[in-house]
Every structure is written in C-alpha cells, then in structure tokens.
Amino acid sequence: MDIERIINNIKDNQPLIHNITNYVTTNDVANMILAIGASPIMADEVLEVEDITSIAQGLNLNLGTINQNRFKAIKKSGLTANQYHIPVLLDPVGIGASKLRQQYVHELIDHIQFDVIRGNISEIRALYQNTSTKGVDANYIDTITPDNILEVVSYIKEIAKMFHCIIAVSSAIDIVANEDKAYVIYNGHPMMSRITGSGCMLSGLCTAFISTNKDHMLDACALAFICNGIAGEMAYDKMIERHSGNATYRNDLIDAIYLMTPQNIKERAHYEIY
C-alpha cells in the first residue's frame, strides 16, 4: 500500500465528491470530506443530479433517509456516474429493516455497477441473503471476531465476486475486500458507535479516497478505513484528556482526519492482508 501516493492524490487533486446522503448526517459528511482535502457537494434534486454528477470525481450514495424522490435522484446519479466512469459507492443503510429498502437496493444493483458497497456486517449479509437486520445497527450475531475472521473473509470475498465490486464492512474488526484480496483492519474505538453518522462519514471518506485512486481502489478504500479507525482512536484520547462527551468526540474525529499524515498512519496502522 503506497500511503503517500494515495493521500497526495487526494490533496493535490481536491476532487469534487457528489453526495446524496442521510439528511441526519449531511453536514458531518461534508466536513469529513473537506477534512481529507476533497470538496463536497450535496444535491438530491432529480432535475439536476445528472449535471452535478457529471462534473464530480466521485459519487457517494446513501439510503439512510430514503423516499421515492431521493431514490429517483440516486438511481439517476448512479447511471450518470457509470456513463462518465466516475467511481461510485453505495451505502445500503438499514437494508434489512424494510422491504422497500431491499427493493430499492436490488433495483440499484440491477442497473448500476458500483465500485464499492460499504455497510456494517448485518447490512452486507442482508444484501447477500435478503435477511432482516436490527434497524441500522449490526446484529450482535454478526460480530466479526478473531475466532471467525477466516470464515468471514471468505464470505466477504464471495459477495465481492457476486457483485463485481469492493465490499467494505464496518465492525469492531473491519474488512475491505475484493474477490481476491482482503484487508482486515483492527484500528478504531467503540466510542465511534456512540455518535450519529460515523458510518455515513466513513462512506464519504471512502468515496474521496477512491475518486483519485482509480487504479488501486482496494488499497485506497482500505486506507480510508485505516485513517478513520486511527482518527477514532485519536479522538478518544482527546476525549479522555478533556473529560468531554460524544458531541466533542465527533468534532475531534473530523479534526483527526484533517491532521492525519502518512507518518501518523504508518505508526498506528494495524491491519493484515488475506
């Protein structure tokens, strides 16, 4: 993994990232993208999304607060991204929570080629098996542990092969894989689950990373996860130092991404390749 090259490609090119994302976390996603050196734009009006997507370098699609009009905008944006060979990420938030979300996600997958699908392990399992999940949180049954890591890696590679894309799984142990290679990432902190939208922010971050690193998207997506995990650890250190709470933690998480350097990453990255 060429850390300097991946990071410098983002900061030197300052890619425009088009986001149709969760209303709850739009501001946080925008700030996370700005923190890494990219530029966010949020546009979900179906009459303009083709124009906006066509000038972007990456597209981040999130089903967190879905409705019929937003779905039309998401689908049109994804088709446009494919037309212009723009990297596109899908975050199938809460796919197992309702039949509507399942229907929407599978319609998107039938018509759009995604470069990355990012979700928690329960969402990815629901995507693959059409099973139900516990809202937008990972089901405790699906926890990735050192004891089942080989089994889960094989499972994620199988899903990546089925959908012809990178599958990026958020958990206590993260997995970012294509059909041939998997990064198993141990960075992060449980406090990240105590703020709203940590996954949404990660999706925006991943889109920024892959947008300027098309030739090595797996490495770039894995590095986004590593940076995010390190930022979570650094933010927790600040939280303890200040005796602060989860709102400040969210800001410190974004600050840590802004201050991230290749040297930080090399010193703190904790991952294995399978």
Image (cartoon, grey):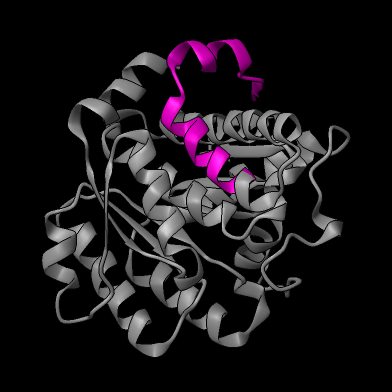
Residue 41 in sight from this viewpoint: yes
Q: Would you place residue 137 above or below residue 191 in this image? A: below
Instruction: Say which quadrant the N terminus sits in.
Output: top left
Pinpoint residue 231: horizontal percent, then vertical percent.
58, 32
Q: Residue at x 31, y 82 (%)?
A: 72
Please identify the quarter of the rendering in which residue 240 is found.
Answer: top right
Residue 222 in sight from this viewpoint: no
Q: Would you place residue 43 above or below residue 215 in this image? A: below
Q: Which residues are magenta?
A: 249-274
Magenta stretch: dominant SS?
Answer: helix
Instruction: Say which quadrant the C terminus sits in.
Output: top right
How many numbered badges does the structure rendering display?
0
Pinpoint residue 226: horizontal percent, then vertical percent.
56, 29
Q: Residue at x 33, y 72 (%)?
A: 74
Is residue 250 magenta-colored? yes
Q: Residue at x 28, y 30 (%)?
A: 10
Pinpoint residue 144: horizontal percent, then vertical percent.
79, 43
Answer left or right for 151 relative to 170. Answer: right
